[in-house]
Amino acid sequence: MTSRTAKDRLIVALDMPTVEEAQRLVVRLGDTVSFYKVGLELLFAGGLDLARSLKSDGKKVFLDMKLLDIGTTVERAVANVTEIGVDVLTVHGHDLKTMRAAVAGRGSSKLKLLAVTVLTNLTGDDLKQQGSTLAPADLVLHRAKLARESGVDGVIASGQEARRIRDTIGPGFLIVTPGIRLTGSSTDDQERITTPDNAIASGADCIVVGRPITQADDPKLAAETFVNHIREAELPG
Ligand SMILES: O=C(O)c1cc(=O)[nH]c(=O)n1[C@@H]1O[C@H](COP(=O)(O)O)[C@@H](O)[C@H]1O
């Protein structure tokens, strides 16, 4: 996650119903994509085996489990995840206990832990329903500070919040941003979206892209387009 070629900064979310479909997509994407996210949908359809096989093919793998439970359970679950040999794991960033338990469970392994701040499909009204009086950007920043304090490696947030997180917390703290869309494309069920260019220019380390690539007529071309946007955003000035 520390390498910073434009290609390594694109994480493709393999949100697909079956491992076979995901494998076909990985073959089509070939060398264009080096980093994959395996999340809840695929995890309940044999996704862990796919995660292992992606690792043995030299890809980076992000296991998106969004863990949230009592500390003992989180700690032991994360300890078991370290045995799988993936690169990144998500936990919820709601409280210090969960994140500290994840850090304890990671032990001395190289597993990177990312805390999910406020899901990118949520708005201020959704937060009010949850009983929070904070605006999404303020709650994200609050949770990013907790995440820093807990010892996890970084956060998942919208690109809209990346600049504030980077300015407040500084370098060396990972910011990974889903909810990425090219200008004019469908937002699907996402709310706090940004373009890849804006996310990278705002200090994001990596962007997560699912449907704009997985459901594109030409997924390889779509992935190349996102890598090009990252590259352009990296250019000085
Ligand atoms: O943890 C995540 O990866 C995540 C957090 C978040 O706040 N928002 C979010 O969309 N995601 C994931 O990022 C991916 C976004 O997919 P698309 O909207 O299809 O690009 C999905 O796999 C989501 O599960």
Image (cartoon, helix red, strand yellow):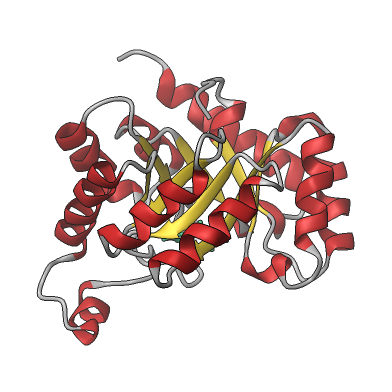
In front of the other: 32 or 36: 36
Q: Residue at x 56, y 44 (%)?
A: 88
Q: Residue at x 39, y 33 (%)?
A: 200
- Whether residue 143 sits left or right of residue 9 in the image: it is left
Q: Position of residue 212 (x, y in %)?
A: 61, 55
* Vertical relation: 174 (above or below) 79: above
In front of the other: 57 or 30: 57
Whether residue 118 is visible? yes
Quarter placement of the C terminus: top left
Q: Position of residue 73 (x, y in %)?
A: 49, 68
In front of the other: 96 or 231: 96
- Whether residue 219 sits left or right of residue 157 in the image: it is right
Whether residue 157 is visible? no
Q: Which residue is most to the top?
A: 236
Q: Residue at x 72, y 66 (%)?
A: 42
Q: Position of residue 118 (x, y in %)?
A: 32, 63
* Vertical relation: 32 (above or below) 41: above
Q: Position of residue 80 (x, y in %)?
A: 63, 55
* Vertical relation: 103 (above or below) 60: below
Q: Quadrant of residue 138?
A: bottom left
